[in-house]
Amino acid sequence: MPRSVNHVASRARRKKILKLTRGYFGARKNVWTVAKNTWEKGLTYAYRDRKAKKRNFRALWIQRINAAARLEGMSYSKLMGALHKAGIEINRKVLADLAMNNPEAFQAIVKKVK
């Protein structure tokens, strides 16, 4: 009796991954083993960089707050310490946005904590 193989399902599995690797360079898009390895490694990069993105944005917000605070004659650490001491609960994301897009509001906050 001939061996029974579900070729439809295995081809569908391969096609699904080859479709996800469209646009990759060279053999990475059409050679099954290379495409599969590239796709799997891409998933690990995506997982890692979702975590790194949070760190990068926090660093960017801190740099923006520091630059705006120094224009007001304070350092970042002094400003953050004064904010906590004054009981002003405002996160770095909002503070950085104010520093960039609404400098008057940022100045008002700095004056409040000085």
Image (cartoon, rainbow, N blue to C red):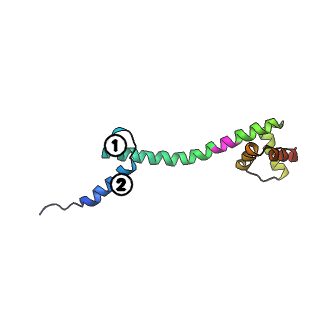
Mark found first going from the N terminus, 2 or 1 = 2
10 Å crowding of disc 2: few (<14), some (14-19), many (20+): few
Quarter of the image for the N terminus: give it: bottom left
Quarter of the image for the C terminus: give it: top right
Is residue 1 within the magenta segment?
Answer: no
Please indicate whether residue 45 sits to the left or right of residue 94 in the image.
left
- Kindly state the secondary structure of the residue where label 1 is placed: helix
The residue tagged 2 is 16
Tell me which residue sits at (26%, 60%) in the image: 8
Residue that lies at the very extreme toward the left in this rendered image:
1
Percent of width and height locating residue 58: 66, 44
SS assignment for the magenta stretch, majority:
helix
Quadrant assignment, res 107: top right
Percent of width and height locating residue 101: 74, 45
Amino acid type, residue under disc 2 in the picture = Lys
Magenta residue span:
57-61
Percent of width and height locating residue 45: 48, 45
Please indicate whether residue 64 sits to the left or right of residue 53 in the image.
right
Q: How far is disc 2 from disc 1 in space, using C-alphas?
A: 14 Å
Tell me which residue sits at (76%, 52%) in the image: 90
10 Å crowding of disc 1: few (<14), some (14-19), many (20+): some
The residue tagged 1 is 34
Please indicate whether residue 109 sits to the left or right of residue 14 in the image.
right
Percent of width and height locating residue 44: 46, 47
Marks 2/1 in contact by CB < 8 Å: the verdict is no
Please indicate whether residue 45 sits to the left or right of residue 14 in the image.
right
Tell me which residue sits at (39%, 42%) in the image: 24
